Amino acid sequence: MPIKLAIADDHPIVTKGICNILRDAVNVEVTDIYANGTALLKGIKESQPDVLLLDMHLPDMSGPELAASILKNYPQVRILVLSSSDVIFQVKKMLKLGCMGYLLKDSDETTILQAIETVYKGGQFLSPALNQLLIEDMFRNKKSEKKTTTLTRREKEVLQLIIDEHTNQEIADKLFLSLHTVENHRISLLHKLEVKNTAGLVKVALQTGLV
Amino acid sequence: MPIKLAIADDHPIVTKGICNILRDAVNVEVTDIYANGTALLKGIKESQPDVLLLDMHLPDMSGPELAASILKNYPQVRILVLSSSDVIFQVKKMLKLGCMGYLLKDSDETTILQAIETVYKGGQFLSPALNQLLIEDMFRNKKSEKKTTTLTRREKEVLQLIIDEHTNQEIADKLFLSLHTVENHRISLLHKLEVKNTAGLVKVALQTGLV
DNA sequence: TAGAAAATAGCGGTAAACCACTATTTAATT
DNA sequence: AATTAAATAGTGGTTTACCGCTATTTTCTA
């Protein structure tokens, strides 16, 4: 019996590409394709796949949201995250939620197939590039366990406006806040995302699709 | 005789996806797939396709570089740019170089097919989302024609270090420059890329793959 | 309903970014 | 050889970002 694989990604190029790659694999069968989070949550009730290839950036729901919901209700589904971003704290977040693997979109065919098989068999899979990054990250943070970060509603709003090139004063005006409040949000963003300045904020935000 | 289509993209998922989408299209035949610029320039000599689907971010050469070279030597090849970034000045740059279309990677199947056919017939094609952006851009710049921008070697170096979260002083130390020089480069970056601050610099750089 | 987290606002201060200039020297190109 | 673009460096100034605090109110949640 082949592995039942569901794919959740909003880009036809990606889903078609994976289907094409798996076409010759006799032990994997693509049973469902979902282009957004709502469809995924709805569909997964009926047809419960063995492995779910989950894109980090579906249009309506975030990767972590979906992963948490699915793993809670259908813990037997093994989630293999599909992402083009190698930002490490995003990787850690998904793994801590219980995802079984993290696959970069620039992977080649054998890697993709291998990842699916590994995860199906109960193993973990990480794209090779991530192994090194995770190890480096562990050494950096050996002092104390880092908790993975979630931004608050306000922080996300502020971050979006920073990305839109607004100053703190402009953000304060737009959100009807004191300048001090915006500064505070900004600094907690710096701390939470572990970056040094505005450049780091924008970089992490864009690479993780936080906003 | 079907349209001879070549694809230049380093992601197997993408190339396989496009092949899959075009499998049922009797009037398009994928003749070649290239994973990098070198292979592309080498291969295009032999088999000259009607249409080239060109990714903006091949590992060894930039999109504009490749487009310029190909259009110079093989002007009959119609280039359809394939990109996930909708940064407008990148779009303008490629179109001014002579590319016949700009296709976003989140396009659906019919759009992709339509784009290829349109370009083959001698027309231009833009992903719908870009039309609106280009029009807005024109209104913004109606006063005077904006020349598309090319960053100098130094500017790119400085920009990369900005993205790496370094301050001007740190950049100056790293590159053995005066602080003033770095400030000047930074300001010309702001002007060239038409952004207001560091956030804009990082955003444009990441979205266009300038660095 | 008590405790925690989030959102709000403030103070005082330093460092960095941003801006408009001028000006010299060094490539690149015609 | 002449012109242009790039890279370099400067002056002098304003604005913004960054940092570490404290503190109150609101909202969430165990």
Image: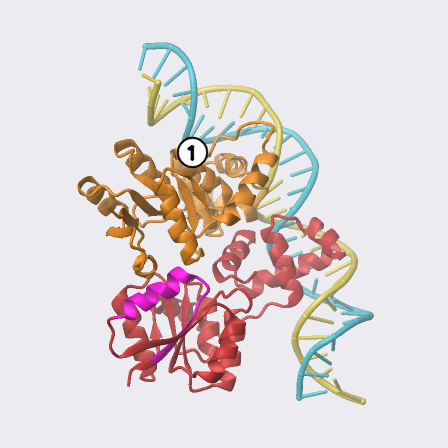
Chain colours: A orange, B red, C cyan, D yellow
* Chain of the residue displaying label 1: A
Check residue A83 for magenta coloring: no
Is residue A112 visible to us here? Answer: yes
Callout 1: 10 Å neighbours few (<14), some, many (20+)? Answer: few
Identified by mark 1, the residue type is Lys
x then y, percent, for residue A30? 26, 52
| Residue depicted at 51% across the width and 57% down the height | B206
Name the residue furthest left.
A46
User: Can you tell which quarter of the image residue B127 is in?
Assistant: bottom left
Find numbered disc 1 in the image and state the secondary structure of the residue it sits on.
helix
Report the residue marked by disc 1: A96
Q: Is residue B7 magenta?
A: yes
Check the picture and name the quadrant holding the C terminus of chain B. bottom right
Residue B143 or residue A4, whichever sits in front: A4
In this view, B185 is above or below A51? below
Looking at the image, residue A174 sits to the left or right of residue B115; the answer is right
* Bounds of the magenta segment: B4-23
Q: Is residue B85 above or below residue A161?
A: below
Visible in this render: residue A34? Answer: no
Toward which corner of the image does residue A97 lie, by quadrant? Answer: top left
State the image coordinates of residue A148 (x, y, percent, origin top left): 47, 33
Coordinates of residue A111 in the picture (x, y in percent): 43, 53
| Residue at position x 67%, y 60% in the image | B184
Within the image, what quadrant is residue B49 found in? Answer: bottom left
Q: Quadrant of the N terminus of chain B?
A: bottom left
